Every structure is written in C-alpha cells, then in structure tokens.
Amino acid sequence: MKITGLITEYNPFHSGHLYHIKKAKEITGADYCAVLMSGSFVQRGEPAVFDKYTRTRMALLSGADLVFEMPAAFSTASAMEFAAFGISLFSALGAVDCLVFGSESGNLEALKTAARLLTEEPPEFKNNLRLGLRSGLTYPLAREKALAAALSRPSVLSGKENLSDILSAPNNILGIEYLRAGLAQKSHLKFYTVRRSGSDYHEGSLPADRAVYPSASALRREIYRIFCLETGLSPEEKQNLLIERCHKHIPKDALPALIRAVPVFADDFSELLSYRILCGVPDDIAELSPELAARIKKSVFSPLSLSGRAAALKTKDITYTRISRALLHLILNIRSSDTAAWKAAGYAPYARILGFRRESRPLLTQLAAETSIPIITKTADAAKKLSEPALSMLEQEIFASHLYQTMKCRRGGSFQNEYTEGLIII
C-alpha cells in the first residue's frame, strides 16, 4: 500500500485542489491520499471562510481518502512552523510514504537547492541577510535577496528562472519550508511537487473560463460580496447566489457540501479583538513582538475592525499577514510558552481525524499499525490517550473551534460541538 500526503487549507476547496489530488496520486502511484487540513483558522491570520466540517466534506467528496486536522496553534503560524507541523505529523504516522505540494516553479531541484541554502546558511548568506535587515528590509525580502546573492555559480535553474523569483512566490516559499522541515527532522518522506496553474495566487476576480483554475482569494472575495454586500436577500437566496456564481470553479461532487454552509470572515471577530485589547495585551502572545504590542496599546480606544486595525498597524518592517496572525493569536490566547512546549513535544503529538471515505478503511488500518503518535477519532475520549502537552494542544484547538462556531451562529449557522460532532464518513 502506498500513501501520499497533502498539506492544505482548502479555503475554500476548488477545482485547482481537485487537480492537486488527482495529480498527486498519478505521479506517486499512490493507493490513498491522506490530507492534513487547517482547522477553523488559516495561515493568513483569519478564520477559514467555511467551517472545517464543510471543507472536509468537500475534500472527501472530491477524492481525498482521509482528512486530518491541523490545530490553530500551527495552522496560524509562520510558514516555517506550519510546514514543520505537517512534516512532523506525516512522518510520525509512519505509513505515509511521500508528500506532494504545489508550487509556482514546479522545479523540485531548484526548491531543494533553496532549502539547503536556507538550512546550512553559509557565511555569505548570513552576512547578506544581516545587511538587508539593517537596511530596513522586511525579513522575507532580506532573505530573498540574500539567497539570490549567495548563488555565485550556475545551478539547477533553467531558462529565465532564478532563486529570487522562486522565493518571492507564496507556494514556492511554503514548498521550500516543507523541504527544510524534512531535512531538519530527517524525515523518511519522499517529496514531489506539482506545478501550480491557473489564476495567480493573489488574483482578485474569478476566471470566466471553467477550465482555468481560480485563486482561493478570488473565491473568498466573491463569497464575501454575496454574504456581506448583497442587500435585501434572504439566506436561501444568498445560498442560491453562491452556487450560481461559484459552481464553475468548485468541483461538481463537492457542491452539495455547500448547502446551508454559512461563511465566517475576519471582521466578524472585531468586537472580540477590541475586548481582548481593552483587557490588556499579555507579554507572551505568539508572534506578538514587544514593538507591535506597544503599537496596539496606543490604539486601545480606537473603534477599528480587525482588518482596519491590522492595516493601521502595518509598517514597512511588519507585514500585514504577520500582524493579522498576531492579532488572531491574541483573540485565541495562543501563548509563546504553550507553542514552545508543543514544539518540544514534537510539534504533532497526536493526529486527529475529521473524516474519511468508507472504501478507505484499509488506510486507517495501516496508519493505526504504523503510527508512533495517538490517532484521535473521538474527541471526548482523547484525554485517555494523550500526554499533558498533547491534551493541552487539543484543548486549545477545541476552544478556537468553539469560538469560530459562535461567530458562525451569529451569521445564522448552527453550532457544532467539538465533543459531540462525529466523524464525517462519505
């Protein structure tokens, strides 16, 4: 039995993700595809547009065999920590043979070259990085320029491709972090990449052609327009409009999962963020630097939305996404001390299943036989299986999920209790 792993957000699931699943099975010859998906919150520092149960159902209906949950502490972390959790989980499961990730480049050897440089950090690279930071560049841009400068001889790159271009593309960046995590953890996983095609990652509008894969950003914008900007429509009419406008870009088999689905948006958490700031900003919120904390405290009484506050706090040294993650960590009370303990416990001290396909039961059997970490299928019984650090991570995730569900209820959705919600079985 051969099992391939995918690390995903599916925010929301669309035709490009279906292509990724099919291509991953094709190039690896895998019998099964196991997916690790961000739970209620995503790496941009925002809530997922649809809840994890809806997105799990969409993935399973479209060919994924099994969906694991990535908890909020790492699904909302930096690319490095996000990747480290994913590689740790799939490595610990034992039975997963390989990981297939999407990239703008499609050039695995080039991405491996970048990963090795960033892991080994030769003197020239470190010096150029230091100079870049001193000149006022953000860390990502300083790292990008230092990496390009460190290449003094021809490499595996071809045509007009260069490592500076590679490191500035979001899926390439994440792919490099997967490869770095594989090196750091001495993982047995074999890595493959599928070249990303279709709309640009940041494309703001949906393509007219069904054959062109959309960007998830464009889909989220369209969903926001339907549910927040279209006035005078009933919930049923908004649901119908959602299907009408997005059906070309969401796999046909996945569309039934969107029936009665209620979206959640970042600014739904604005009042909660203001409350948390008024209560005082703790010193050890994950990714919240002392400088950013000081700036937040200066705007305590500003009646801003979450997105408005993030925009107001943005500087040339701190990216909007990093600020959004820090603000979300404040809302969710994700502490640096807790994440440090969870990393010390191996990043992924358990694997929680959200759903699976019935015909994939042999996959579950194989995973259970080879895993070195507990596999959670029933949250209410987790305390009997987990160590203290693992249980605290799960409890933090349950808190985050219930907060998400509360906001979904405010929009007219139903509350799904983490202790009683069953596995999704297709």
Image: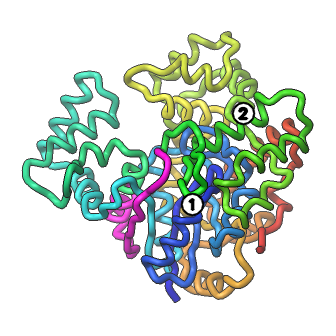
The residue nearer to you, when weighing 336 against 32, is: 32
> Is residue 51 depicted above or below 317 in this figure?
below
**Residue found at x 19% / y 54%:** 159
**Residue found at x 15% / y 49%:** 122
Report the amino acid beneath label 1: His
**Residue found at x 43% / y 77%:** 27
Q: Where residue 78 appears, x then y in whole percent? A: 46, 44
Residue 297 seen anywhere in this rendered image of the structure: yes
The residue nearer to you, when weighing 302 against 109, is: 109
Q: Is residue 190 magenta?
A: yes
Q: Which residue is mark 1?
A: 17
Q: Which residue is mark 2?
A: 225
Mark toward the start of the polypeptide (1 vs 2): 1
Report the amino acid beneath label 2: Arg
The residue nearer to you, when weighing 344 against 324, is: 324
Q: How many marks?
A: 2
Residue 73 seen anywhere in this rendered image of the structure: no
Q: Where residue 207 appears, x then y in whole percent? A: 57, 46
Figure quadrant of residue 267: top right
Side of 311 relative to 269 (left or right): left
Magenta-highlighted residues: 177-200
Q: Where residue 93 appears, x then y in whole percent? A: 53, 75
